[in-house]
Image (cartoon, rainbow, N blue to C red):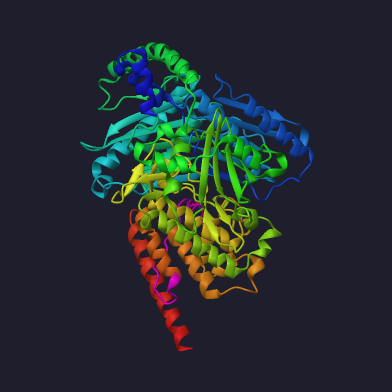
Amino acid sequence: MLQRYRIMIAKSKKSLIPFLLCILFLTVTETSASVFNNVSCTSNNTFTPNSAFSANLNTLLSSLSSNATNSVRFFNATAGEDSNTVYGLYMCRGDVPFALCRECVGFATQTIASSCPAAKEAVIWFNECLLRYSYRLFFSKMEEWPRYQIKIPLGDPVVLHSVGFYTALGSIFSELSHAAALALGESNNPYAVKQENASASVTLYGLAQCTPDLSAGDCKRCVADAAAGFAKSCCGGSIGASVLFPSCIVRYETYPFYQHSGISAPTMVKGKSNIGTEVIAIVIVLVIVLMMIFCSGYGFIWIKARKKRKASVRENFEPEIKTTLESLEFDLATIEAATNKFSEDRRIGKGGYGEVYKGILPDGEEIAVKRLSTSSRQGMEEFKNEVLLIAKLQHKNLVRLIGFCQEDQEKLLIYEYVPNKSLDHFLFDSQKRRQLTWSERYKIIKGIARGILYLHEDSRLKIIHRDIKPSNVLLDNDINPKISDFGMARMVATDQIQGCTNRVVGTYGYMSPEYAMHGQFSEKSDVFSFGVMILEIISGKKNSCSFESCRVDDLLSYAWSQWRDESPFELLDPILLESYSPNEVEKCIQIGLLCVQENPDDRPRMGTIISYLSNPSIEMPFPLEPAFFMHGRMRRHSAEHKSSSEFSLKKYWKELMGWRQTFKRGLRHTT
């Protein structure tokens, strides 16, 4: 991409520096996709499909989505009357750009409807917005339940357990509760931020915001109650944390997560480190104005040069690999003939980046053609990335790339045809999953593990997939799994432990917490996604499903609860109850829970997982509670929050369970 920019600048005979400033401005102001946090649905008050309440709810959600305009960050509405009335509102976080606010509200209305299909009351939180509805009037009422807490257990333990860290955190939220309440009467976009030095090298940044329909007193109390959780439970060992209530949100991080351009000013609470804030703000505004002037001129040159150039994907690659790519490139006419010009009867699937068609080449070979949509977020860089990666990867558990095509506006990837579609096509269908016996599911688990191990350790490259999920696992005629869709994969150095990105991509429910919240990805990010998939394969349920009998919101919590209560087979898909191997099922559940532990360092590497699956007698550690586990925390709220001794208790619990596991195995051998 930079090469293309250099060519255009050379043709225009202008200096390179202003153009790079323009690119920097565009990069800084680009918005990223909304990040899902949690959804809570009532289970004791439901409605029936096609009822008056259902129709009113659809009307309400449509109204909320359509009112998320460039000037409306908070909106409440009512639909229906009498007992079928539905009340709802949304609130965007005050610092996010308007475009991201609209996108977040759109995602929220879609996700809450699918996640809570029959609940009369629900609330959903994204990083950028919250949305809720209810059968009861809750406007202008301060409510703290249901609630959700996120913490990221990373960072220097010396700093995180220091007096300075606790003092800075307490200072931030003691002042933010006042500032957030004050902002309700002073701004159309009421939120407050504050920063404070925790040490010479660590600065804490905090944000608090209430729904604007609250009174100042209720807002102050809501923020204070939410922030109390930081002081009592989560900050020890956490580099960042959030507490999400229906009526307010609070968050702190060790980086300025709330700094965006082009937004209305928040209520700033000045700390000791903010002496020159006003001067810095003026300089930033002046720099942005200069960038915009340069962009207007060079943008015109860039658009004009782009129209004159006929794209060829080979121009984007290094010279040494052009020869290989030339042998893989197809012309558009051949692919159109193979797919009958992308006719509807040849379409076999649709994903986030476009549609997939079945085709037959002139030599009779069957192919699958991934046609990227013109509106897709996967642009030239992702297209180039996928071609580069898959062309170099060869493994029986990875889908094979046959070729690619880029002509005019078309970007096509040509794969081997895998007849049985994707794993989710079977796993989450009440009838089709009957075709997957336990032996086949166990084979699928091992095959996926081998494919990920190849990506992480055995190929010439080190690949982090970043989007491991059932829809990206294809099944061939023999039910062998093949990992596909490498558009979001990242190649890292073989000795690199982790990477970081400002653009978080993937699918919520499968993202590890450190990646979803901070953009930190590593092999352990893929391990987390794999652990979620194992539990889904065993149970036949999606991670977002509701297990009402246990009053928890997700599959990970349910699996942990059953494991902790020594009833792991309650997780098993009922279809498999008469044809499963107890030892294999128990082993896979334990591996799945080990993979989804909150701390990345506690999760096993893929090589270790392969040894667990291959060796029946190998001892495995006892898992700790999974990331985002909520059931136990909600139950303990009325009594007390977690104490600073949580780590030692976890260690004791882990050792105790390890002894119990060893005893049970010894008992089996004796009998």
* Region rendered in magenta: 614-640
Residue at coordinates 71% horizontally, 47% vertically from top-left?
46
Foreground residue among 425 and 214: 425
Percent x, y for residue 174?
36, 34
Answer left or right for 85 relative to 412.
right
Q: Is residue 543 above or below residue 106?
A: below
- Quadrant position of residue 201: top left
Q: Residue 637 magenta-drawn?
A: yes
Q: Evaluate whether residue 386 shows in this view.
A: no
Percent x, y for residue 395?
46, 57
Answer left or right for 173 relative to 33.
left
Percent x, y for residue 297?
40, 11
Direction front: furthest residue: 363
Direction bottom: furthest residue: 671
Direction left: furthest residue: 200
Percent x, y for residue 585?
54, 70
Foreground residue among 282 and 498: 498
Answer left or right for 98 relative to 177.
right
Foreground residue among 359 and 504: 359
Q: Dividing the image into 4 quarters, which one contains the N terminus?
A: top left
Q: Evaluate whether residue 333 shows in this view.
A: yes
Q: Is residue 576 above or below residue 531?
A: below
Residue at coordinates 62% horizontally, 57% vertically from top-left?
427
Residue at coordinates 54% horizontally, 31% vertically from top-left?
407
User: Which SS type dominates the magenta stretch?
Assistant: loop
Q: Is residue 518 above or below residue 265?
A: below
- Quadrant position of residue 436: bottom right
Q: Residue 417 magenta-drawn?
A: no
Direction right: furthest residue: 51
